[in-house]
Amino acid sequence: PPLNAALKKVLDARDAADVHGSERKKERAAIAFFYASHGFTPIWSKDGHPVEGVESVLATLAHASDDALTIPQTPTALDAAGGPDAVAASEIALTEAVIAYARQATGSRINPRDISPLIGSLPTLADPGEVLDRLAGSGREAGAKLRELNPSEPRYVALRDKLDEMRAARSAGGVPIPPGPTLHIGMRDRRVPLLRTRLHLDPPAHGDETKFDGELATAVADFQRLSELPPSGSLNGATLLALSGGGSSRTEGLIVANMEMWRWMPRDLGADRIEVNVPDYLVTVFHADRQVDQHRVVVGKTDTPTPLFSNTMKYLIVNPYWNVPQSIIKKEMLPKYGDLSYLDGRGYSVSYRGGVATVRQLPGPKNALGRIKFLFPNDYSVYLHDTPSKSLFAASTRAFSHGCVRVDQPFGFAETVLNAALPEGTRRVWSEERLDGLIGDKERYINLPTPLPIHIAYFTASVEDGRIRQRPDIYGYTRLVALALGQAADPIPVAERKPRVVAERTRRRSAPEAVVDDGLDPQ
């Protein structure tokens, strides 16, 4: 039929076009394959009329910015009644917008490895053919099913709702307030009447309409809090921009970056699970999606970041040996001791194979891994473990390790993870006291009755009690994500020691390197 032939012609022309970006090329190739496998039959129109659900899809695309997505050339309507060429062009334009939305919603805009090769949390991108098959049979639910490709995790939804609230406050409308000097209480300025109107204040009782008084300062501070700006109560440049409905705040860039990083996470985190949020310096255990335990942790230094990934914790070891990494032997032990034989018999065993020294620390109270470690297979050779350096847990900033995660009160944590997935009413086999009784000089392996998903993640913003809570961007990752998404020029302040340099250097590495922890006190 003429329409099928026109669709083929449009797809062939697009295939031959020079499209920048490998993701766009992949998307167009997948779309062409889908239509070819369906005989170039249109999916959005039939007999000159849009199919049911097209309007809902168009509405979802129109609101893509609600989820901080940026869909190029979003169509506002479908031409289903024109000539074959016009209908085919409109059909493919809508399909390309749908697939762009689906891919962005599932994390196509940034390859996390471009931020750092130590980020192993890679998103699962939507398959174009599966998306089109799913929407084609969804009727009026097609738009909702398209939007469902965004994360459904409540913490993501809370960030999205906060972003919407902030944007609504910023676009209050009206005539832009002219630029001028920063206004404080007691100053007079011709912009004050417009400012009072914008903040829904009545004329002042004192009769001086140009005076920036205490009532106005309070209203400005309230607006600043809603816009996630410092509540100074003064009319400064950032507040002026927000009141005039222009620009985006640094906090918006922070929210959008964290929303994007949620797209990297598995969509099913597991009702029973373990989460480490590196910028929080906390490990949390969940049972039936409820927090049941939380401990302070020490994470990797800025020059030895803790890798980010998801895996499954399967067992733990009481009285672990520590096999000292070659990097630590060469960079730390040899310069310090010179002759490694000094360590032999002092809590370590030293051996040589092919002229290469191997150092192993024996179980004991001074072991760098402490008395217990928690194992889950991963490409980075990192794990959670105890430490003899207990004092570090008292610090507010706890980025001290070589990459592994050190856990405060690890035997209490062990009791929780060994019992977290047990059905209600089941007798606990393992207690903290029983685990303490295993302390000695021999390794003791304990399998988790039910292996638990573990997620080592990096989120610097969350919504708590209706407000944004910010955490230090210790590795500079949030800033790099915000920049990659085209947010403000440099929206995320760096809060730790040279994280920008570290992040840039880490990003340039060609492949992940095994990160192993020495557990040694940084002093």
Image (cartoon, rainbow, N blue to C red):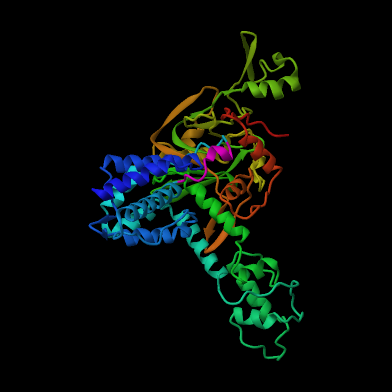
Q: Nearer the viewer, residue 321 or 156?
A: 156
Residue 29 screen position, x and y as percent: 39, 39
Quadrant location of residue 81?
bottom left
Front position in the image: 196 or 94: 94
Q: Is residue 61 visible?
A: yes
> What residue lies at 65% left-to-right and 72% top-to-bottom?
221
Left or right, 360 with reference to 12: right
Q: Tell whether position 212 is magenta.
A: no
Image quarter in which the C terminus is found: top right
- Residue closest to the eye, 10 or 390: 10
Left or right: residue 190 compared with residue 136? right
Magenta segment includes 113: yes
Name the outermost residue toward the top: 354
User: Majority secondary structure of the magenta segment?
Assistant: loop
Q: Is residue 414 left or right of residue 449?
A: right
Residue at left offset 49%, top offset 28%: 317
Q: Position of residue 298 (x, y in %)?
A: 61, 40
Q: Quadrant of residue 350?
A: top right
Give the x, y percent position of residue 235.
Answer: 70, 72
Up the image or down, 108 lies above or below 183; here it is above
Magenta segment range? 107-116
